[in-house]
Image (cartoon, helix red, strand yellow):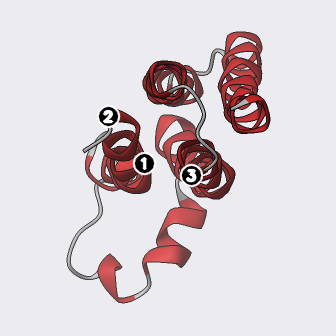
Amino acid sequence: MILAYWCVLIAAFMPLGFIGYAKFAGKNKMGPRENHTPREWLDRTEGAQKRAYWAQLNSFEAFPPFAAGVIIAVIAGGAIGAVNTLAVLFILLRLIYGWCYITDRATLRSLVWFAATACTVALFITAAVG
């Protein structure tokens, strides 16, 4: 299987890592009682836990165009080496993005977000050129 397809799978489940951090790291861990209304509980979190939740939401937003870009680039006959490189770079950047979000590095987070988004755009360009 093409490496980029594995990256799509990783990107699909990446939000779970961020929400896991939000729920189980820090001083205000989620317990069985809070699991009855997890969204209300997450809305009450603060600091790194809240930012991890926001990283999860942003990861859900970034996933569809990335997945589409990978699939379209491969189907259109884009260079597989380029597709794989862009997909791996996207995953690495999105992990760094989550770290930046959780640790409150706003400017760096925005730069990393832009770079990951550029990878998605480059996938579509690879498809167009392919």
Furthest-bottom residue in this view = 36
Q: Amino acid at mark 3?
A: Ile
**Residue drawn where x is 26% and y is 82% of the image:** 33
Q: Which residue is mark 1?
A: 8
Q: Residue 77: x percent and y percent?
A: 58, 40
Q: Mark 3 vs mark 1: which is more N-terminal?
A: 1
Query: How far is disc 3 from disc 1 in space, using C-alphas?
Result: 15 Å
Element under label 2?
helix
Numbered disc in front, either 3 or 1: 3
Whichever of labels 2 and 3 marks the residue nearer the N terminus, that label is 2
Tell whether 114 sits left or right of 75: right
Q: Which residue is mark 3?
A: 75
User: Disc 3, disc 1: CB below 8 Å?
Assistant: no
Q: Is residue 101 left or right of residue 26?
A: right
Q: Determine contact: label 2, label 3, CB under 8 Å.
A: no
The structure residue drawn at horizontal position 28% and vertical position 55%, both measured from the top left corner, is 29
Q: Find residue 124 and report its horizontal and vertical position in percent.
A: 74, 38
Measured in 3D between alpha carbons, the distance from the residue under mark 2 to the one under mark 3, in whole angstroms, is 14 Å
| Residue 68 vertical placement versus 70 (above, below) | below
Q: Which residue is mark 2?
A: 3
Q: What amino acid type should be assigned to the residue bearing mark 2?
A: Leu
First along the sequence among labels 1 and 2: 2
